[in-house]
Image (tube, rainbow, N blue to C red):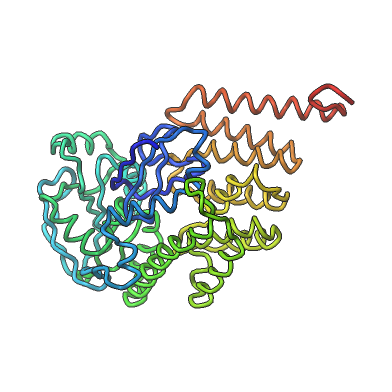
């Protein structure tokens, strides 16, 4: 096994079974897992071993995460993980700025005014993707909300001059007030104090007219939040309760994921056994005690995989309901898509299951907040393969055409990747032509 590195990276989930997201400048051999937003585990492995590593990597990843974060998951479940010292409803911490890099300096939060405080870094690809959207919001709410963007968690090799050069290079894509923090005071006083450091960046805090924290989250969810806050339809108590509930349920999901892996056979442990029926019984007990966990991320992945092995019809029904729900705004489509991809060649999956996979793929495409971070061409390519498996050649060809169009729309792409997609399209066309004349690929009637 290659060397493993544990490091904090942008909070972007990258599907292990077939990477379709660009977290930063990752090559095709690099597999990244968000490890429940604690630490990111990066493992370079041969492409032929990706599926096996991906499906059974949760055990290794969680062990590494527990080690790297001093047992955060287990501590959270037991209740001895330090509670956030900064919560929604609390007075916003002070601004500690090293230097303002763009816009109008803000020294303090003034009563009667609304503020958006966003944290970013030059190495953070999702931060860069969010910048034009934040600029649009800053323009939309120019007379109502002041936007501040604070550079934090920066690499030691990046000087203030380089940060300023980056900001200047973004131009109108970063059209709001920008500053660099003083030492790590704001990363500590805001991100760490609120418990959001584990989610990394980008992260947004909204400060209301009373100087209180009104909301914390990802920039993609900011438009709806601002609409309510500026419309005086925001309930601080409800927002606090929702945040605490998400933290509680996520901690339980993290913990039970570790427990459920004992029912999953791993190629790395000869003594392990695949026990899908036992896993489903364990999940039923967990969800019986806490129904809100039915479609928590890890429980969804485990449940759907076990149902694929035991009851295709129930698996289809479970996936259908899962695609219509979310876990605190997180789509479950990637988990459905991933399990189907993993078992596509090892289980006799029904056409209905592949159709659910196709719907999950489309959901991933439709819900991509920052399409430039997602290798959408890979998702279309997967859709095409599944359409072909369920004898929908015309739709397979159309999906493959979309894959080609998608990769060509990227600023940078591999000529080899494009050639592979085009070759696959020609195979579909050839097979379709042969079918139309009543012949198989060997030329027999």
Residue lying furthest right: 445
Q: Nearer the viewer, residue 155 or 370?
A: 155
| The C terminus - image quarter | top right
Q: Position of residue 325 (x, y in %)?
A: 54, 63
- Whether residue 433 appears in this view of the structure is yes
In the image: residue 220, left or right of residue 338: left
Q: Is 67 situated above or below 321?
A: above
Residue at horizontal 35 percent and vertical 50 percent from the top? 11
Q: Nearer the viewer, residue 290 or 141?
A: 290
| The N terminus - image quarter | top left
Q: Is 279 situated above or below 203?
A: below
- Whether residue 138 appears in this view of the structure is no
Q: Quadrant of residue 258?
A: bottom left
Residue at horizontal 57 percent and vertical 49 percent from the top? 337
Q: Position of residue 392 (x, y in %)?
A: 74, 40
Q: Position of residue 2 (x, y in %)?
A: 37, 36
Q: Is 396 situated above or below 298?
A: above
Q: Position of residue 358 (x, y in %)?
A: 63, 47
Residue lying furthest front: 271
In the image: residue 16, left or right of residue 176: right
Tally of numbered tags: 0
Residue at horizontal 51 percent and vertical 46 percent from the top? 267
In the image: residue 286, left or right of residue 243: right
């Amino acid at each position: 096994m290659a060397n493993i590195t544990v490091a904090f990276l942008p909070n972007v989930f990258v599907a292990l079974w077939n990477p379709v997201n660009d977290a930063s400048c990752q090559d095709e051999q690099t597999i990244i897992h968000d490890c429940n937003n604690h630490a990111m585990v990066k493992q370079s492995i041969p492409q032929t071993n990706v599926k096996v590593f991906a499906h059974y990597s949760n055990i290794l990843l969680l062990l590494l995460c527990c080690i790297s974060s001093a047992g955060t998951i287990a501590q959270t479940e037991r209740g001895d993980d330090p509670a956030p010292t900064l919560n929604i409803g609390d007075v916003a911490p002070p601004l500690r700025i090293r230097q303002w890099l763009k816009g109008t300096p803000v020294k303090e939060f003034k009563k009667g005014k609304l503020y958006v405080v966003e944290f970013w870094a030059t190495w953070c690809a999702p931060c860069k993707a969010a910048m034009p959207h934040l600029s649009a919001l800053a323009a939309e709410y120019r007379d109502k909300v002041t936007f501040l963007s604070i550079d934090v968690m920066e690499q030691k090799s990046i000087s203030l001059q380089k940060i300023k050069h980056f900001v200047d290079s973004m131009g109108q894509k970063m059209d709001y007030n920008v500053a660099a923090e003083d030492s790590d005071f704001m990363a500590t006083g805001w991100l760490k104090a609120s418990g959001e450091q584990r989610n990394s960046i980008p992260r947004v805090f909204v400060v209301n007219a009373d100087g209180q924290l009104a909301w914390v989250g990802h920039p993609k969810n900011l438009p709806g939040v601002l609409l309510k806050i500026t419309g005086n339809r925001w309930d601080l108590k409800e927002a606090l309760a929702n945040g605490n509930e998400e933290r509680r349920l996520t901690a339980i999901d993290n913990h039970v994921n570790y427990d459920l892996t004992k029912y999953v056979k791993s190629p790395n442990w000869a003594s392990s056994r695949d026990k899908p029926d036992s896993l489903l019984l364990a999940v039923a007990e967990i969800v019986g005690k806490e129904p809100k966990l039915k479609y928590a991320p890890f429980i969804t992945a485990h449940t759907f995989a076990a149902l694929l092995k035991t009851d295709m019809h129930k698996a289809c029904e479970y996936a259908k309901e899962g695609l219509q729900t979310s876990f605190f705004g997180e789509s479950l489509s990637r988990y459905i898509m991933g399990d189907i991809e993993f078992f596509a060649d090892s289980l006799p999956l029904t056409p209905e299951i592949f159709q659910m996979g196709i719907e999950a793929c489309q959901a991933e495409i439709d819900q991509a907040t920052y399409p430039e971070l997602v290798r959408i061409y890979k998702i279309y390519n997967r859709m095409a393969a599944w359409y072909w498996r369920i004898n929908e050649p015309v739709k397979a060809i159309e999906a493959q055409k979309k894959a080609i169009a998608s990769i060509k729309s990227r600023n940078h792409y591999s000529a080899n990747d494009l050639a592979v997609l085009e070759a696959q399209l020609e195979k579909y066309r050839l097979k379709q032509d042969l079918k139309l004349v009543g012949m198989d690929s060997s030329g027999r009637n």
